Amino acid sequence: MENNIFVKDLCKRFDSFTLDHVSFQVPKGRIVGFIGENGAGKSTTINLILNELKADSGRIEVLGKDHIIPTVKEDVGVVFDECNFHDVLTASQIEKILAGVYKSWDSALFHRYLKKFDLPDKKPVGKFSKGMKMKLSIICAMAHRPKLLILDEATTGLDPVVRDEILDLFLDFIQNEENSIFFSSHITSDIQKIADYVILIHEGKIIFEEQKDDLIYNYGIIKCGRERFATLSSDDYLIYRDAKLSMECLVRDKEIIRRKYKDLVVDNATLEEIMLFYIKGGIS
């Protein structure tokens, strides 16, 4: 499978943080969710991909080319968690600026998006709500018809209804099997809804890179008392944690565990629960 992002052994050292040999890929026609706690390395990784930071070592390819090649940016749409447009500009003025930047800018598509998301074209951005600013940023990222979207907390500040509309827009974007989305978000329910693959980063290291469906449909959580926990084989769970009133264990295949331990409660696991097991000091 061809990739629109390929990252291999990426390293970046700061005084108090190290991005440590990070490797992953974003296949064509897929949405890859990038999750982890604040400070885990998500934004650092994205800034390295975008050549906003210089890596100490490692390899980054975007759309099959070295990420530092200037022409790559023509085919990449980027949305950060804050709107970067000047407060005095209107959407129409922003469009005129961006139409001069991107050869593939589609004015009709831009105005169609404005109408779809009820954004005024003559009102200064400084008078927009945070949600309106995020919608405008997303529209601008998509109106030059990129092949790759890189999103860093792009649904932050949007109400659930608008978030749902935006997520549907992202799903439409990848339908041609050539486009891809690399989507960093702390809203794991958004990732769970639309991602094909999920990457978890923790303290600068990749913990897992898995198909989303495998995580959601196969992983589970055992809940039992301490005495019963002591009888479990450590081979049967990935991580355990003390929940005070009970012991909880994350398992890779809940159906196998349900068959083996018929007396145990084995719940389904959400993406957020899986992430928290790894981040909040579970013991493997």
Image (cartoon, grey):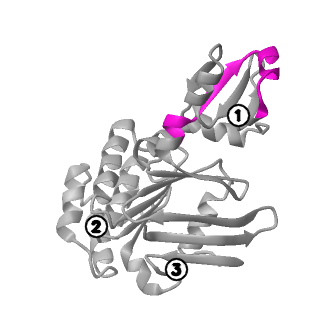
| Residue under the image location 71 percent in, 33 percent down | 236
In magenta, the rendered stretch is 215-234
Front residue of this view, candidates 227 and 191: 227
> Where in the figure is residue 139, as x and y percent of width and height?
32, 60
Disc 3, SS: loop
Q: Is residue 274 visible?
A: yes
Viewer-side label of 3, 1: 1
Instruction: Relative to 86, say whether 115 is above or below.
Output: above
Q: CA distance from mark 2 to mark 1?
A: 46 Å
| Residue under the image location 35 percent in, 53 percent down | 135
> Where in the figure is residue 121, as x and y percent of width and height?
24, 60
Q: Is residue 245 left or right of residue 80?
A: right
Q: What quarter of the picture does the N terminus occupy?
A: bottom left
What's the mark number on residue 19? none
Name the N-terminal-most of marks 3 and 1.
3
Circles 2 and 3 in contact, beta carbons < 8 Å:
no
Disc 1 marks a residue whose amino acid type is Tyr
Viewer-side label of 2, 3: 3
For disc 2, the marked residue is 143
Q: What quarter of the picture does the C terminus occupy?
A: top right
Packing grade of label 1 (10 A; few <14, some 14-19, many >=20) is: many
Residue 232 on the magenta span? yes
Q: Quadrant of residue 146?
A: bottom left
Instruction: Relative to 83, say whether 234 is above or below.
Output: above
For disc 3, the marked residue is 67
Disc 2 marks a residue whose amino acid type is Ala
> Where in the figure is residue 205, as x and y percent of width and height?
70, 58
> Where in the figure is residue 108, as x and y percent of width and height?
17, 67
What's the mark number on residue 237? 1
